[in-house]
């Protein structure tokens, strides 16, 4: 395994890097962004994972997410993977839609053809990339991990955390797709990647996982009230109801006037990072 | 004059807008970005101008500049114009180079053909756009203006401020082209826009203006030491020397490890905004 450095830039008292590696999981090259605050030799820093939304690569949050100042202040490493496999031989939505295929891996391990070979983003973010970070970034303390994400990546953050309860000390999300089995984006993606049997979908639905007994250590969610996807796609209220039924500790904040964009995400990013940092203390 | 709203997004407790208008000065449509923090009805807020660098539009700093949190905190309006006229009939560098023509107006009023008709960014940022903001944005207090910018826009900020000493209470720059008459970018642009007579260039050279007696109220400059353009194009040392000769108050900070990118700009943006806000208090 070699990690190719595509770029490094000094920023906010740390190093913002972009890295590429050959992924055995997806059978493609994969690119991710990682910010490492300056630290003393031998120091160990907690790791905050950020999973991005539909159409995004590692670059969107790196450019627009405004996370570096807060990560430097709190001494948190920030890792942002891509949202799907890419490259020669990777199939895309047959109609070229932006809500499926390239940029829309939905953090699942596909079982249906032609997706099953490459679309294995669940295993990539749950297993391969953490192992790579552990090997290649000695400052990363994988005993202290948090996870967050936006929209499809908020769905990813919630479901990865619900399925791996010992891995994360802190979980948050920005405008997550809260119940993919009950919205058009999710139904399109899950039926194509996993087939028609809805039983197989429930491992990829935060509300279904909570109803089935999975729990998070705690949860912070911000959701813009002016988000055009709120009613049909995101369904924040179903997450609030599932948390209520389960007694799951959660802070779900509706933010008046805010939409689905990085103008929204960046506004609340520093608060999320502080919230994670508090729970990721040594 | 009508101001067309291209977009508005709520962000960091304010409104990030993108606006387009027909410019009499450039003879084209012009687009700019403006962030207005929430404020009480009738309140007046100071205005900080940001002039962008080569190849940029209003969008680069809007997406990557990380200015909104600090502007909201300090109650400062932030206006980011485009860097050149654009559109049908606007000539570009005949070889398509990125350092001249479109995206590279150098904040001059061109006198040479074929540039003289449209390339009038000096008058646009000095006269037309401030008048437009005064008319269209009642919260903007043009008695309290500051100006900053990056690279070519740092050159713009310095020279606009040096030529209009009563307009700005605060001036700063990120990695400015400090002496355009003495570097390849500047020599190419000024000779094409203004002709071979170097006398005409001196109104567009911060060091020459300071040597000729122009003064700034104060000056803050950040410059990355790892900036690949530092030696040949930016020549920060000439600005420091000119300020020294003139007794011009200035804080010029060399920042180890930082390059010419928005990873650098965003790191020091909040400090610049705080510095301006202190000088723009009511």
Image: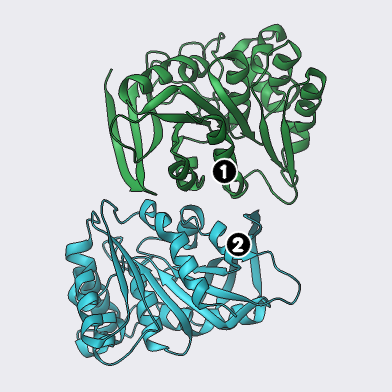
Chain colours: A cyan, B green
Number of dots carrying numbers: 2
- Furthest residue to the front? B282
Quarter holding the N terminus of chain A is bottom right
- How crowded pointer 2 is (Cα within 10 Å; few <14, some 14-19, many 20+) is rated as many
Picture quadrant where residue A249 is located: bottom left
Q: Position of residue B13 (x, y in %)?
A: 36, 47
Q: Is A83 on the left or on the right of A22, as rendered?
A: left
Q: Residue at image x 46%, y 53%?
A: A64
Q: Is B6 on the left or on the right of B166, as rendered?
A: left
Q: Residue at image x 27%, y 29%?
A: B4
Q: Position of residue B219 (x, y in %)?
A: 66, 29
Q: Position of residue A213 (x, y in %)?
A: 28, 92
Closer to the camera in the image, A13 or B63: A13
The residue marked by circle 2 belongs to what chain? A
Picture quadrant where residue A69 is located: bottom right
Q: Is A116 on the left or on the right of B124, as rendered?
A: left
Tell me, for residue B269, which label it has, or none.
1
How far apart marks 2 and 1 lie (CA) works out to 15 Å
Residue A117 in view here = no
Judging by the rendered image, the residue that carries numbered circle 2 is A72
């Amino acid at each position: 395994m070699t990690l190719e450095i595509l770029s490094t830039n000094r920023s906010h008292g740390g190093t913002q890097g972009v890295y590429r590696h050959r992924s055995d999981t997806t059978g493609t090259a994969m690119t991710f962004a990682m910010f490492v605050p300056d630290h003393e030799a031998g120091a160990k820093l907690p790791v905050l994972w950020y999973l991005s939304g539909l159409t995004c690569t590692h670059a969107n949050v790196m450019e627009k997410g405004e996370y570096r100042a807060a990560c430097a202040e709190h001494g948190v490493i920030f890792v942002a993977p891509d949202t799907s496999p890419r490259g020669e031989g990777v199939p895309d939505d047959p109609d070229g839609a932006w809500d499926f295929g390239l940029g829309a891996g939905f953090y699942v391990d596909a079982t249906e053809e032609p997706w099953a070979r490459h679309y294995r983003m669940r295993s990539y973010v749950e297993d391969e990339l953490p192992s790579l970070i552990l090997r290649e970034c000695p400052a990363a303390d994988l005993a202290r991990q948090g996870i967050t994400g936006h929209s499809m990546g908020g769905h990813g953050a919630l479901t990865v955390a619900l399925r791996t309860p010992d891995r994360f000390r802190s979980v948050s999300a920005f405008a997550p797709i809260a119940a993919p089995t009950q919205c058009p984006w999710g139904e399109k993606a899950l039926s194509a990647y996993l087939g028609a049997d809805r039983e197989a979908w429930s491992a990829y639905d935060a509300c279904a996982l909570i109803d089935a007994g999975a729990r998070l250590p705690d949860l912070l969610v911000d959701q813009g009230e002016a988000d055009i996807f709120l009613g049909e796609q995101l369904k924040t209220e179903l997450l609030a109801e599932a948390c209520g039924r389960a007694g799951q500790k959660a802070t779900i904040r509706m933010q008046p006037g805010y939409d689905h964009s990085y103008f929204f995400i960046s506004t609340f990013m520093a608060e999320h990072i502080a919230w994670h940092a508090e729970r990721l203390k040594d």
